[in-house]
């Protein structure tokens, strides 16, 4: 099977999932063609059956903004035509779904080229609700051959906001549990914390929706009862605000800003609790990666998070913005080694049993096969 994958190449969840799916498909002897404006983040080494096609965006003084949607459409047409693509799988509806539909329509391949749109979150719950985009997203969904969603929460939101009659298949995000597993890194841990200190960790793109300042406030509360350090992984617009808050709370020695990192397994392996106090999460891929490394999660009870983090089993969820409650959950786990160990084992078990990549891959393969029959 020849599969075209369109995605954002950045560190966000949609790009990571799309890239990892491509790796899995290629390993299963499918030919995978990535189409994006730059090389996807996790596509940095050679793998047989994987090809990358760069979208070149022309710039003309006449146009105030670049014409990415049109340039992407043109590149999809080119790749689909000359590589004889069977399935075009677009991740994140805006603008990928409409570009995919236009390409398919221009090629006049309504029967041979199948369009699959995977919804990841803000393409439906935020950006897609903009009045300028809403009818376009709705139209592109209606004209997709199949729609998938990374959580039941997001599927229900799509039905609610777009009133689509199309069936939405829920295929959750996944993790390579053979790669994301807890390892022993005593020397690395010593670089960040003393033996009697706990390590809390947060990984995100530091955007307002992630509520990074809340992680710092949680640490500040935890420090009233326990010795702890907080590792903040990632970068983005809220980093300066977070750094200022750390100084204002006088806890600079307890917080490390590590920026973008590729060695996530090592950092998760030395951590005790993963914090995810987000305002909105359609799934929570970073929480799943933490769970796969045996790290219990304390998160907001919003969106698709309860479909991943099982309250009282793999971690805890609290109401959005309830800093005190989240801090209490952290302290309760750090105070009880037996409970922490049970949560750690449960987190790993759930990741392996429900979200391992080889449990999820067949769902996509079956979907592709059903479209080509």
Image: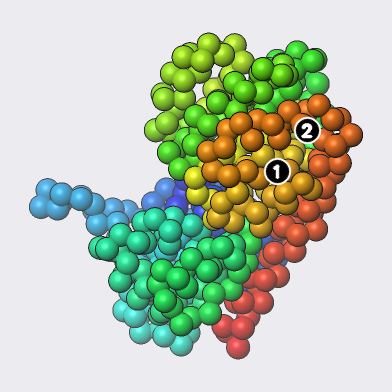
Q: Nearer the viewer, residue 241 or 186?
A: 241
Q: In the rendering, which numbered label is found on residue 333?
A: 2
Name the outermost residue toward the left: 62
Discs 2, 1 touching: Cβ within 8 Å: yes
* Picture layout, residue 43 above or below residue 258: below
**Image position, residue 288 (x, y; %):** 68, 48
Q: Nearer the viewer, residue 12 or 327?
A: 327
Q: Nearer the viewer, residue 128 or 115?
A: 128
Kind of element beneath mark 1: strand
Quarter where residue 335 is shown: top right
Q: Residues within 10 Å of mark 1 (few under 14, many from 20)?
A: many
At 47% from the left edge and 73% from the top edge, which residue is drawn?
A: 159
**Image position, residue 226 (x, y; %):** 73, 19
**Image position, residue 248 (x, y; %):** 46, 14
Name the outermost residue toward the right: 338
Q: Do we see residue 197 in this rendering?
A: yes
Q: Which residue is mark 1?
A: 316
At 36% from the left edge and 69% from the top edge, which residue is drawn?
A: 137
Distance, label 2 to label 1, CA atoms, is 10 Å
Quarter where residue 271 is shown: top right
The C terminus: image quadrant:
bottom right
Q: Residues within 10 Å of mark 2 (few under 14, many from 20)?
A: many
How many numbered callouts? Answer: 2
């Amino acid at each position: 099977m020849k599969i075209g994958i369109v995605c954002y190449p950045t560190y966000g969840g949609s790009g990571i999932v799309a890239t990892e799916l491509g790796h899995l498909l290629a390993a299963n002897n499918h030919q995978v063609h990535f189409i994006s404006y730059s090389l996807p983040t996790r596509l940095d080494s050679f793998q047989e059956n994987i090809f990358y096609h760069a979208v070149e965006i022309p710039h003309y003084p006449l146009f105030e903004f670049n014409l990415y949607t049109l340039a992407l459409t043109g590149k999809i047409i080119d790749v689909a035509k000359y590589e004889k693509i069977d399935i075009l799988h677009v991740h994140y509806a805006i603008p990928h779904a409409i570009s995919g539909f236009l390409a398919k329509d221009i090629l006049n391949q309504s029967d041979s080229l199948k369009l699959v749109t995977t919804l990841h979150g803000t393409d439906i719950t935020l950006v897609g609700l903009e009045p300028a985009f809403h009818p376009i997203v709705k139209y592109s969904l209606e004209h997709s051959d199949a729609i998938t969603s990374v959580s039941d929460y997001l599927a229900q939101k799509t039905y609610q906001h777009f009133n689509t009659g199309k069936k939405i298949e829920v295929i959750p995000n996944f993790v390579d549990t053979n790669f994301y597993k807890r390892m022993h890194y005593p020397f690395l841990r010593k670089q960040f914390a003393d033996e009697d200190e706990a390590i809390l960790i947060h990984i995100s793109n530091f955007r307002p929706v992630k509520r990074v300042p809340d992680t710092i406030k949680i640490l500040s509360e935890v420090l009233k009862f326990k010795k702890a350090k907080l590792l903040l992984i990632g970068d983005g617009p809220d980093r300066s605000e977070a750094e200022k808050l750390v100084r204002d709370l006088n806890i600079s020695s307890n917080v490390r800003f590590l920026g973008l990192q590729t060695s996530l397994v090592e950092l998760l392996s030395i951590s005790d609790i993963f914090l995810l106090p987000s305002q909105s999460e359609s799934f929570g891929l970073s929480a799943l990666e933490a769970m796969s490394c045996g790290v219990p999660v304390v998160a907001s009870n919003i969106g698709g998070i309860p479909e991943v983090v099982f309250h009282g089993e793999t971690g805890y969820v609290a109401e959005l913005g309830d800093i005190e409650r989240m801090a209490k959950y952290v302290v309760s786990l750090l105070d009880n080694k037996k409970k922490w160990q049970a949560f750690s084992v449960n987190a790993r078990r759930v990741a392996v049993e429900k979200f391992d990549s080889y449990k999820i891959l067949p769902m996509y393969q079956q979907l592709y096969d059903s479209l080509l029959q």
